[in-house]
Amino acid sequence: MANAHRGEIEAELSGRRYVLCLTLGALAELEHGYGGEDLIAIAQRFEAGKIGASDAIRVIGAGLRGGGNAVSDEEVAGMTAAGGAQGFLSIVVRLLRATFAGEA
């Protein structure tokens, strides 16, 4: 079960429930994946509505690994979510809100 006080969310991917969390290590992974951009620049990118499929893979993958799941980005790319693309975007938005706004 996800602990909202720790910034965790729960999401269903490919029929399995996972806990996702953008830990400090997961956030560092995202910074590295975005060419060294800092967290503010990454957050501003997403706030501007610039979230593509590769962004969703990267954020969900980091969140899964931060939640203790040994899942590669390649495996994330092959997963499904209820609602298709909108379902993936919903997971990304919920995870970012839980991390940066304290909302689960």
Image (cartoon, rainbow, N blue to C red):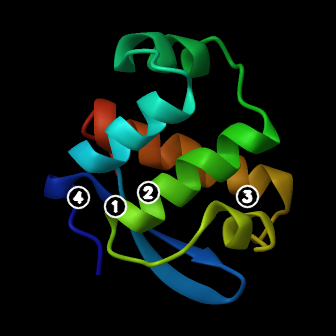
Question: What residue is at 46 percent from the left and 15 percent from the top?
Answer: 37
Labels 1 & 2 near each other (Cβ < 8 A): yes
Disc 2 packing (10 Å; few <14; some 14–19; many ≥20)? many
Please identify the residue farthest to the right as the structure is shown: 84
Give the secondary structure at mark 4: helix
| Disc on the earlier residue, 1 or 4 | 4
Give the secondary structure at mark 2: helix
Residue beneath disc 1 = 66
Given this view, does label 3 or label 1 mark the residue nearer the observer?
1
Q: Measured from the top left, where is residue 62 in percent x and y?
A: 47, 54
* Amino acid beneath label 1: Gly
Residue beneath disc 3 = 87
Q: Whole-Å distance between the Cαs marked 2 and 4?
A: 14 Å
What label does residue 85 carry, if any? none
What label does residue 4 carry, if any? 4
Residue beneath disc 2 = 63
**Figure check: 66 above or below 32:** below
